[in-house]
Amino acid sequence: MAIARDEGDACRVPKPPADLAETAYLRNGYRAILRILIAEEALASQSCTCLLDQFTWDQALDALPRFQTSDTPHLPFKVLDLYAKADELEAQIAAGCAE
């Protein structure tokens, strides 16, 4: 499932489509997972360019087992922890690219 970009910031991971998951909590978690995956790839490749086009929502869904913290279907992960991790990785990219 391709990612439709937001107009405001072309490289910001947009809100996921409603059909990605049944609740906003899950959709927000998948958005955070995708942010983490993109940031990890940028750090590994030492890239300062936008990598959003190289990822899909399906990759976030496929990565769920790596980030899953619970067997509860409606709360499989801790969204705030995922957001904190994504923010941390994105800050590392920003610092590295500012040099």
Image (cartoon, rainbow, N blue to C red):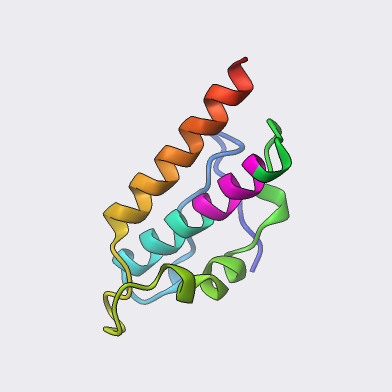
Name the residue nearer the viewer: 72 or 28.
72
The x, y position of residue 79, in whole percent, is 31, 59
The dominant secondary structure in magenta is: helix
Q: Is residue 19 visible?
A: no
* Residue most extreme to the front: 44
The x, y position of residue 34, in whole percent, is 53, 56
Report the label total.
0
- Location of the N terminus by quadrant is bottom right
Identify the residue shown where x is 61% and y is 53%: 4
In the displayed structure, would residue 54 be above or below residue 59?
above
In the displayed structure, would residue 50 be above or below residue 99?
below
- Location of the C terminus by quadrant is top right
The x, y position of residue 59, in whole percent, is 61, 68
The quarter of the picture where residue 43 lies is: top right
The x, y position of residue 7, in whole percent, is 57, 37
Identify the residue shown where x is 47% and y is 59%: 33
Please provide the residue range marked out in magenta: 35-43
Q: Is residue 29 visible?
A: yes
Identify the residue shown where x is 32% and y is 69%: 77
In the displayed structure, would residue 3 be above or below residue 48?
below
Q: Is residue 23 left or right of residue 4?
A: left
Q: Is residue 74 left or right of residue 30?
A: left
Magenta-drawn stretch contains 25: no
Q: Is residue 20 left or right of residue 44?
A: left
Q: Is residue 64 left or right of residue 24?
A: right
Name the residue nearer the viewer: 84 or 29.
84
Identify the residue shown where x is 38% and y is 73%: 68
